[in-house]
Amino acid sequence: AQSVTQLGSHVSVSEGALVLLRCNYSSSVPPYLFWYVQYPNQGLQLLLKYTTGATLVKGINGFEAEFKKSETSFHLTKPSAHMSDAAEYFCAATSGTYKYIFGTGTRLKVLA
Amino acid sequence: NAGVTQTPKFRVLKTGQSMTLLCAQDMNHEYMYWYRQDPGMGLRLIHYSVGEGTTAKGEVPDGYNVSRLKKQNFLLGLESAAPSQTSVYFCASSYSDRGTQYFGPGTRLTVL
């Protein structure tokens, strides 16, 4: 069965510091992988996605993620955190069965 | 281009009452989804649709019904609301079965 695990329900970083949000997946077939961001009282917005090809994926707002098949991981990074990055981040996976599996989310707090 | 819209934005029900949540998308997407979001549990799929006139059960379908009479609309019904259905409900749509999901702003439902 497919599953998505996000390590750390809350992550705090200082403004300007590296952001690293972890996501691991389990799937019997290579999945498509996504990172979404949710700002307070809003719906989810796509940050980036991996389908096939290049394993380093760049998204909006300076975020990127690397698909590592051997580690079944798709961690999200940003070199320098900004106050506006404070939000909840969700990793998701699908293997094309119309069903997307979402992780439980990581709330990012950026400290001034 | 409004994307995905949901009505209402907020609703308070008493136990046993019924209501319908409306989701509309103007992107001509075939696939539509209803999720519920609860603290610490991420997004869980309630029902989904792969085209007009078709619906299927997701991970947590009990207590909910859906209809997709028009391609652009996906309705979620609660026949007899229970306090356990207090949640934030999100609708999403996608062009393909592995495509980016576009989310509505959510409906915050409280069942007393």
Image: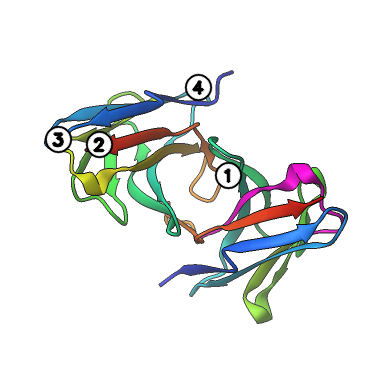
Q: Compare marks 1 and 2 and give the one earlier in the sequence.
A: 2
Is residue B72 in view from this perspective? no
Residue under mark 3: which chain is it in?
B
The residue to which callout 2 is attached is: B66
Could you say whether the residue bearing mark 1 is in a helix, strand or loop? loop
Is the residue B18 above or below the residue A74 in the image?
above
Q: Amino acid at mark 1?
A: Thr
Disc 2 from disc 4: Cα separation: 19 Å
- Which color scheme is applied? rainbow
Q: Which residues are magenta?
A: A78-93
Instruction: Residue B107: give x, y in percent of width and height.
Output: 40, 32
Looking at the rendered structure, which numbered label has been put on residue B79? 3
Residue under mark 4: which chain is it in?
B
Q: Compare marks 2 and 4 and give the one earlier in the sequence.
A: 4
The residue to which callout 4 is attached is: B26
Query: Residue B1 in magenta?
Result: no
Residue placed most toward the observer, B72 or B88: B88
Disc 1 from disc 2: Cα separation: 22 Å
The residue to which callout 1 is attached is: B100
Quick check: do tags 2 and 4 share a chain? yes
Is the C terminus of chain B in the top left, top right, bottom left or bottom right quadrant?
top left
Q: Residue at x 55, y 25 (%)?
A: B3
Q: Residue at x 46, y 38 (%)?
A: B92
Q: Residue furthest front?
A: A112
Quick check: do tags 3 and 4 share a chain? yes
Q: Amino acid at mark 3?
A: Glu
Could you say whether the residue bearing mark 3 is in a helix, strand or loop? loop
